[in-house]
Image: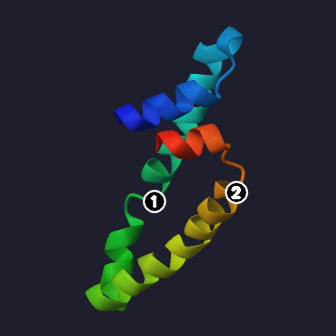
Amino acid sequence: MPLFIAFISSITNKRYTATQYAILSSIATWDVISFQDSPGVLVKDLGWVNFYFFCALIAVPGLLMLLKLRRYETPKEASTT
């Protein structure tokens, strides 16, 4: 959680930090609230092994996006990580 807070703090404008933080944190928790019953139904229908593969498959677009965004990293940021 502290890493998430640091990330949100780094992408918000200092003049509107409270408003932007509230919006971004609400967006981040939307999936937890909206899909909290879905995994149980999916496990029941798919079984645990297929559910695991399904979760891995739907994670691929996000991982590809991270790889694409990596090229926007500045050299200074690359040396500190």
Q: Nearer the viewer, mark 1 or mark 2?
A: 2
Closer to the camera in the image, 44 or 12: 12
Q: Nearer the viewer, residue 43 or 24?
A: 24
Going by the numbered disc 2, the residue's amino acid type is Arg
Q: Position of residue 20 (x, y in %)?
A: 64, 23
Specify the quadrant that holds the N terminus.
Answer: top left
Give the secondary structure at mark 1. Answer: loop
Q: Assess disc 1: are there few (<14), some (14-19) or many (≥20) residues with their C-alpha within 10 Å of its C-alpha.
A: few
Instruction: Name the residue: 50% across, 52% down.
Output: 31
Q: Quadrant of residue 15?
A: top right
Name which residue lies at 63% across and 30% down.
Answer: 11
> Outermost residue toward the top?
15
Q: Is residue 79 above or below residue 12?
A: below
Judging from the image, what secondary structure is the residue with disc 2 in?
A: loop
The residue carrying mark 1 is 35
Viewed as shown, does residue 2 lie left or right of 13? left
Quarter assignment of residue 12: top right
Disc 2 packing (10 Å; few <14; some 14–19; many ≥20): few
Q: Residue furthest left?
A: 48
Classify 10 as above or below 35. Answer: above
- Residue drawn at (72%, 50%), measured in percent from left and top? 72
Residue designated by label 2: 71
Which circle marks residue 81 in the picture?
none
Measured Cα–Cα span from mark 1 to mark 2: 32 Å
The reply to whether callout 1 and callout 2 are in contact (CB within 8 Å) is: no
Q: Position of residue 71 (x, y in %)?
A: 70, 57
Relative image position of residue 36 (x, y in whole percent): 38, 58
Mark closest to the chain's N terminus, 1 or 2: 1
Q: Position of residue 66 (x, y in %)?
A: 60, 60
Choose between 30 and 53: the one closer to the eye: 53
44 relative to 61, above or below: below
